Amino acid sequence: MHRSGWLQDPKTKNTKRFHRDEKSWSLYPKVFIDSGRPLSNEHALLKSRIYVDMSDAKKQWVNLQRAGWEKVPPQWGENVDV
């Protein structure tokens, strides 16, 4: 798994960021999943964060894509072009 990945529902613009927990990665890979929504000309509205093992994160990623969510570039944080 890459360090982070982004999925977005094209209808609602709800977005999920999947990013690995570097502190746990070598022994027991865990992933943070942040949920939020980017807002025009404002900071993103971050709604929740969950902490899951990598296998659960992969399942959620696949299920969201099957439901129509699409890969998108970073939507908030330091990697976003303003």
Image (cartoon, rainbow, N blue to C red):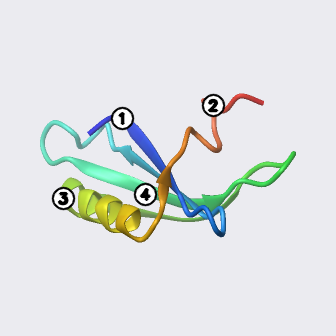
Labelled disc at residue 72: none
The first of marks 2 and 4 along the sequence is: 4
Are there few (<14), some (14-19), or many (20+) residues within 10 Å of tag 2? few
Are there few (<14), some (14-19), or many (20+) residues within 10 Å of tag 1? few
Q: Could you give the CA–CA distance between mark 2 and mark 4, rounded to whole angstroms?
A: 17 Å
Please name the amino acid that badge 1 sits on. Arg
Left or right position of 9 against 21: right
Q: Which residue is mark 3?
A: 55
Labelled disc at residue 33: 4
Q: Which residue is mark 1?
A: 3
Q: Could you give the CA–CA distance between mark 3 and mark 2, rounded to whole angstroms?
A: 27 Å
Q: Which of the pair 72/51 is nearer the observer?
A: 72
Q: Which residue is mark 2?
A: 78
The first of marks 1 and 2 along the sequence is: 1
Please name the amino acid that badge 3 sits on. Ser
Q: Quadrant of residue 12?
A: bottom right
Left or right position of 64 against 23: right
Q: Could you give the CA–CA distance between mark 1 and mark 3, rounded to whole angstroms?
A: 15 Å
